[in-house]
Image: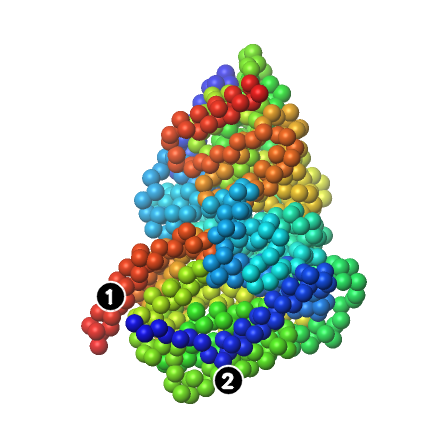
Amino acid sequence: MSVEGTIERARALVDAPLDRALEPWRLANPEGKVVGWFPVYSPLELAHAGGILPVGVMGGGNQIEIAHADSRFQSFVCSIVKSTLELGLTGRLKALDGMVFHSICDPAKNLASVVRRNFPELWVEFVHFPQNLTSPLAEDYLVAEYRRILDRLTDLTGRRVGDEDLRRSLAAYNASRARIRRLYEIRRESPQLLSATESYLLVRAGILMPPEEHAALLDEALDGLSGRDVKPKDRIRVVIEGSFCEQPPLELLQSIEEAGCDILDDDLLLGVRWFLRDVPIDGDPLRALARSYIDGSVHSSVKHDLRRTKAQPLLDKARGGRAHAVVVLAAKFCEPALFDYALYRKALDEAGIPHVFLEFEEKMWIFDKVRTEVETFVESMLFD
Amino acid sequence: MSTVRYQGRMHEFQKELMGRYYAELTRGAETGQGHAAWMLISGNPVELVRAFDMLPVYPEVNALQLGVRRQSLPLIQKAEELGYSIDNCAYVKADIGLFFSGLKAPFATIPRPELILCNYVGCGVYLQWFEHLAEYTGAPIFNLDIPTVRGPSGRARPDDVRYVVGQLEELIALCERITGKPLDQAKLRQILQWSKETGDLWAEIKSLTKFVPSPFDAYFDAVTLMGPLYCLRGTEDGLTFFREARSELAERVRQGLGPLPDERFRIVMEGPPPWPYLRIFRDLFTKWGAVAVASTYSTVGGLWEFGFRHDPDRPLESIAEHMLEYNLTNRSFHQRYQQIRQYVEEWGADALVIHSVKSCRLFSAGQGDMREYFSKELGVPTLLIESDLEDPRYFSEAQMRNRIDAFFEALEHRKLVKA
Ligand code: SF4
Ligand code: SF4
């Protein structure tokens, strides 16, 4: 199949309402449970090992009108928190048996409670990730936390998960992540072959299916890509930072690309790309997963790691990808992203890497202004 | 309207003690002595810091002092020039503005830190704030990771307590390196004893507002007590303050005195106050004879009124339990609902007033749901008003007055109909 066909299949899945997207899996697994996870990172392996389908719930995008959630969360709260609640209040979380939230920020923490109260029939869990990665105790803590989550998942399914189940899941996610890494390599090496929007769709489809199926989908895409032959264009190479949780509309990414940028790297859909290397499958699987969180995972504003300065990973990412510039693309009202921008700005200025700062909302639908802004930025760089 | 005077003996004593505390900070800044540890209010382990004779410095308290004096806006704007967003917590911006203004506040000069102690309890902004400060100051930082209370039981898990105790031991080693002396166990026990007795008094004081009329306002006057509770906890001075405060307030109960000539409404307040407009804000309520009999804000640093005490016989465990379970910010929203419900029922309140502040999403994000729960499910009259705790640009007196007046008019009507 042509890569375009694969991308269209991914797009259809991403655009579909949650219950429709889950239909094939539900039909094949009539007794199976589906648990949604809120961004950024979730230990998907734990659910998968228990026969559960973990599904990414990335808010409502620009498909959904916020009519009820506005009365629960104020105007100064980011959109994804409201649209996620709106999905629930309009019955669209019924497609799920449970939801998992994480300690990424204050609104997400409160959202977990609000969801618990409003949807008592939903199984809701909250994962606290360690915030002191310099402490040798963090690993044991995280192993215990993962064990607790496993127990809670057992409450949901009645099924005990063994080490072998876990290892199989680690391997399955390793395989799909390896293919995602390959997509990003292609973007860095030959951005003309695969646009960021296309790669986004391919990755995002993966949050709606088991990792084995996602790996197959990506194999098909990678296969198709090898036949593509496009000449490089004269564009600037950028990395995007700041969109780790609420996702920008696809059209916004497209506008940035059309304004003259090749997006080599980004922090979109970070959860499915969390580990930089394979999670080891020999030894204790929970420990391997915990250790990978601590020593082998990506940087993010919502992961606090005092072993280096906040902006260092961004500088490394920009330099490693030979980027000309950084686009800080922060969700409106996203406190972690907005905070770290101050440090990024300082570090980028000191390193002589140009950047542009943009704010977005998942439900925005006019992109002219952003596009003009990026065009001006690109021109200033090309003719400098 | 006659102006109401809120000052009593304890207010004067508080001023004196806080003045001394700030003079100590200034001395530290000027002499370079005293090992300043910058820390956060919520559920902090100040007892440990004091056991090392380190000087606890609280950027949050500094920020609110700047707010009360209406000096925060230029500092907030300075931080915004550095790239902080209009939507970021204004405490942080005022503090960072202060740092880049040479740490000279009108009430003290703040000593540079020898330790940045991020005692994370629930508030994600804490982590960001102190990471940034560590980069700006170059001081060593320690992130105490306190897992949020997350199970349905609302209790801290034994695993979590052990994890926090282990980190406290790492922190002790770090403080030993910074100060060059070992932890004095006897001293730590003494400090915990003072904290324990302070906790007893504070809990007793908090229960006095169950009397009618309430002897003090558990929101506006509680703020006066919170300074010593956090900045001076674990000191003899702090304990003396609470002894005096308790006897003054108990005396008021005996005399049947309240903060207002006539207590007409008993309310529960949720959310931090708008510091730059504290007096104006208070008058909007006193005008209606409304007295806060309880507030969630007064429990950000600890929940002694629900039984917690530091324990000299279990020093690190009790510090860990304080941080994990017995402070408002490390609990879930749901637990806060239960706390407020208890206030409404046991303290005999007529209404819940939610002051939603833009800066603090930990406090505010989702308060619409809280209103829904109290007004729709429990039938408690609930008012939600919005401004900010530090940024004067978000305070609209006229709008606030209209909402508050309309609410109390309706409440009065309801009372009449009921009677
Ligand atoms: S977009 Fe930002 S503020 Fe909103 S939930 Fe995600 S991390 Fe939190
Ligand atoms: S968000 Fe709230 S709790 Fe956190 S630092 Fe700001 S005011 Fe304090």
Q: Chain of mark 2?
A: B
The alpha-carbon separation of the residues under discs 2 and 1 comes to 37 Å
Residues marked 2 and 1, same chain: yes
Q: Residue at x 50, y 84 (%)?
A: B247
Is residue B224 shown left or right of residue A273? left
Residue B93 seen in the current view: yes
The quadrant in which residue B371 appears is: bottom left
Is residue A37 shown left or right of residue A265? left
For the N terminus of chain B, give its image quadrant.
bottom left
Viewer-proximal residue among A384 and B142: A384
Percent x, y for residue B349?
A: 35, 72
Viewer-proximal residue among A183 and A159: A183
B30, above or below A260, in the image: below
The quadrant in which residue A192 appears is: top right
User: Which residue is labeled 1 in the image?
Assistant: B410
Q: Residue at x 56, y 78 (%)?
A: B241
Percent x, y for residue B95?
A: 56, 54
**Residue type marked 1:** Ala
Spot the residue most to the bottom. Answer: B254
Q: Earlier in the sequence, mark 2 or mark 1?
A: 2
**Residue type marked 2:** Ser
Q: Chain of mark 1?
A: B
B75, above or below B278, in the image: above
Q: Residue at x 50, y 57 (%)?
A: B71
Numbered-mark total = 2
For the C terminus of chain B, give its image quadrant.
bottom left
Percent x, y for residue B68?
A: 48, 62
Residue B378 seen in the current view: no
Q: Residue at x 35, y 48 (%)?
A: A70
User: Which residue is labeled 2 in the image?
Assistant: B247
Percent x, y for residue B165?
A: 67, 63
